[in-house]
Amino acid sequence: MRASLEQRLQHRDSERIDLSPLLDVVFILLIFFIVTSVFVKETGVEIDKPQALSERTLESSTIMIAISRSGEVVYNNTNIGVAGVRTTVSQLIKSKEKPVIIQADKRVTTELLVEVIDQAKLAGASNVSIATGDKE
């Protein structure tokens, strides 16, 4: 009887499921999703964007230019001013055509917004858009 009890305990130990391959698969999937995810690059300036009825999603390879409430024109956390838009955009689209998205605060004058759009188009950008905020 003692031998059969030992045999049952050994049999029960051999029936345990090894979870290490499952953990390996979970970690590989986690690394895959982290590596393949797309991160949207923001301009670094707080912008209060106006609302729009029609919206499109953002492409991953875009040029984001922000116009702050105080009239600063910012690209990649650097104040480039209206004069710097043309050279910045022309350098960025030199190798590949990218859409330009302008994030303008809703209190920015139309004149300043049009100047930035003109400078981007003069730099050679064929697709210039204005970003709008989320509907609340």
Image (cartoon, grey):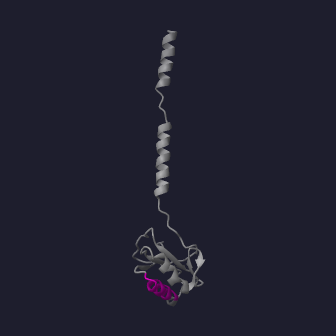
Q: Quadrant of residue 98?
A: bottom left
For the image, the number of numbered tags is 0
Residue most toward the bottom? 111
Q: Is residue 116 magenta?
A: yes
Q: Quadrant of residue 48?
A: bottom right
Q: Where in the figure is residue 74, as x and y percent of width and height?
A: 56, 79
Q: Decide: is 8 above or below 117.
A: above
Q: Decide: is 31 above or below 65.
A: above
**Could you tell me which residue is drawn at 40 percent across and 72 percent down?**
56
Task: Report if residue 52 is visible in the image.
Answer: yes
Q: Where in the figure is residue 19, as x and y percent of width and height?
A: 49, 36
Q: Where in the figure is residue 29, as x and y percent of width and height?
A: 46, 48
The front one of 57 and 62 is 62
**Could you tell me which residue is drawn at 40 percent across and 79 percent down?**
127
Q: Is residue 113 magenta?
A: yes
Residue most toward the front? 95
**Could you tell me which residue is drawn at 50 percent across and 64 percent down?**
39
Prevailing secondary structure class for the magenta stretch in the rendered image: helix
Residue most toward the top? 1
Tell me where the magenta segment starts and ends, as one range: 112-124
**Could you tell me which residue is drawn at 50 percent across and 14 percent down?**
5
Question: Is residue 8 toward the left or the right of residue 44 in the image?
Answer: left
Q: Where in the figure is residue 6, as x and y percent of width and height?
A: 51, 15
Task: Report if residue 132 is visible in the image.
Answer: no
